[in-house]
Image (cartoon, rainbow, N blue to C red):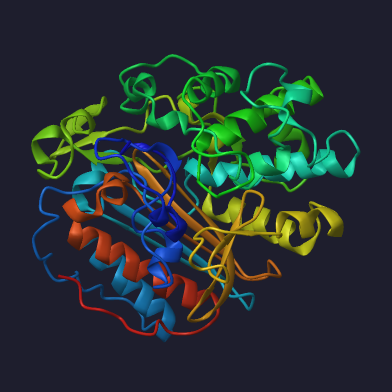
């Protein structure tokens, strides 16, 4: 499906993609972070920006400001180009571990009537949610309440076919073989914002398991949001508490993440970035008919999807956070403040995302890794209508980076939005390198 929770990483490229699918919870992005680094293909989620995305964008506006350090100036320039290419808005945050982080916001003039963007605004995290769900599981493993070797049938008896052979580890690292529920047509009205019903983890899991598995458990790797629907159901069963409460009490409050929460409805808790998709009349011809018409307020050739209910993302993609909060989460995660050394080592034990590249990008437990031209990163991407974000850290958690693009369809259909997809990739690459205090290898012209 083209509007789902996506994991915008390169690994996604290796798996077959049905022609008419709207990847609602792959929570991935076509201009994925890892793809952007040039290591792997694009990982996309949804969200496109402007009616002119197939044209050469106008020159970026010149800002009369005080001279900035070269890396900051480069990111400014590329963020401006991304907006000129059709992105409604962009947030960039880079902390190289030395001094004050770089924070950049750019937005198209037509969006300012809705909201003046700030670097600290909340946004929907999409598949980045998986990293936090995995952290919760590993905390419980450390406390002896769960084991990664537990069969899913132990906690959800009879709810998952072949549940005795599928372990919690297989769910967390996407080797279970379960069909992705975001490819089921029943979820499409919710992902397009036309069905506001709340979804529970059990209901999302039921959508996925009514389809045949893709392969026997543990034999291959394939990204599936159904895995994390099951993870969420296990967390609630094992603790007797809701996912929203678990996130709040085990992660957000201890780390003082004031704008991080698990969304169960469309409500926001603080100032937030508006998310947009092109309206049906301005969607490029390459986008299938069923993914062209989003619910929401229309203006300037776009649909504001910010108020659509994200609960269909569930444990695979319903988190809300900010660039600053997620950097704190990554720093605590990688430095061992959130998990014990033993549990962090389990999280960072990976399986190849592409069987033809056994030493290439790898997926651990809710997080992925790859060697980029500027350094090794741990990262995840997330795409959900209106929002495509990439979050990166170095292995120590001292360096972090985020890029948010306030649209996602271009990641689902990069060939339909070539200029926007290329501009996003270029900015992502430069942001990763800036995190390592290095210039991007090449600053490509856009167009």
Where residue 411 sits: x, y (%)? 31, 51
Residue located 80% across and 25% down the image: 238
Residue located 65% across and 57% down the image: 330
Rendered view: 189 above or below 215: above
Where residue 63 sits: x, y (%)? 25, 72
Rendered view: 4 above or below 198: below
Is residue 253 visible from the viewing direction of this image? no
For this view, does 139 lie left or right of residue 387? right
Q: In which quarter of the image is residue 200?
A: top right
Quadrant of the image for the C terminus?
bottom left
Q: In which quarter of the image is residue 26?
A: top left
Residue located 8% across and 60% down the image: 55
Where residue 41 sits: x, y (%)? 37, 63
Residue 58 versus residue 269: which sits nearer the camera? 58
Is residue 412 visible from the viewing direction of this image? yes
Where residue 198 sits: x, y (%)? 49, 16
Q: In which quarter of the image is residue 347?
A: bottom right
Rendered view: 417 above or below 102: above
Q: How many numbered discs? A: 0
For this view, does 388 lie left or right of residue 138? left
For this view, does 125 lie left or right of residue 430? right
Quadrant of the image for the N terminus?
top left
For this view, does 311 lie left or right of residue 283? right
Q: Residue furthest right?
A: 144
């Amino acid at each position: 499906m083209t509007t789902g929770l996506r994991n915008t990483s390169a690994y996604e490229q290796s798996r077959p993609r049905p022609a008419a699918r709207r990847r609602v919870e792959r929570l991935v992005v076509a201009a994925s972070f890892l793809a952007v680094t040039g290591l792997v293909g694009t990982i996309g989620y949804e969200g496109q920006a402007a009616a002119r995305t197939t044209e050469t964008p106008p020159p970026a506006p010149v800002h009369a400001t005080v001279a900035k350090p070269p890396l900051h100036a480069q990111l400014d320039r590329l963020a401006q180009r991304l907006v000129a290419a059709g992105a409604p808005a962009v947030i960039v945050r880079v902390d190289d571990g030395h001094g004050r982080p770089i924070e950049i916001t750019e937005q198209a003039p037509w969006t300012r009537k809705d909201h003046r963007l700030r670097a600290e605004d909340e946004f929907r995290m999409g598949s980045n949610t998986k990293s936090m769900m995995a952290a919760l599981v590993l905390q419980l493993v450390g406390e002896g309440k769960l084991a990664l070797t537990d069969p899913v049938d132990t906690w959800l008896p009879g709810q998952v076919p072949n549940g005795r052979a599928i372990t919690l580890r297989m769910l967390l690292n996407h080797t279970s073989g379960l069909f992705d529920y975001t490819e089921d047509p029943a979820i499409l009205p919710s992902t397009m914002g036309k069905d506001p019903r709340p979804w529970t983890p059990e209901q999302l899991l039921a959508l996925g398991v009514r389809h045949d598995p893709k392969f026997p458990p543990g034999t291959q790797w394939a990204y599936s949001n159904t895995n994390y629907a099951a993870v969420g159901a296990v967390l609630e069963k094992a603790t007797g508490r809701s996912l929203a409460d678990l996130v709040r009490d085990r992660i957000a409050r201890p780390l003082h993440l004031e704008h991080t929460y698990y969304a169960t409805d469309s409500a926001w808790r603080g100032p937030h970035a508006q998310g947009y998709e092109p309206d049906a009349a301005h969607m490029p011809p390459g986008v299938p008919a069923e993914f062209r018409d989003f619910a929401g307020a229309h203006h300037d050739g776009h649909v504001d999807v910010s108020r659509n209910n994200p609960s269909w993302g569930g444990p695979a993609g319903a988190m809300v956070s900010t660039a600053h909060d997620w950097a704190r989460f990554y720093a605590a995660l990688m430095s061992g403040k959130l998990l014990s050394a033993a549990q962090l080592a389990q999280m960072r034990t990976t399986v190849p995302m592409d069987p033809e590249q056994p030493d290439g990008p790898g997926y651990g437990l809710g997080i992925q890794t790859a060697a980029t031209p500027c350094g090794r990163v741990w990262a995840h991407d997330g795409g959900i209508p209106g929002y495509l974000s990439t979050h990166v850290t170095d292995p120590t958690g001292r360096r972090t980076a985020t890029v948010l693009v306030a649209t996602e369809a271009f990641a689902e259909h990069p060939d339909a939005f070539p200029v926007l997809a290329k501009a996003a990739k270029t900015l992502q690459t430069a942001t990763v390198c800036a995190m390592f205090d290095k210039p991007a290898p090449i600053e490509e012209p856009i167009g």
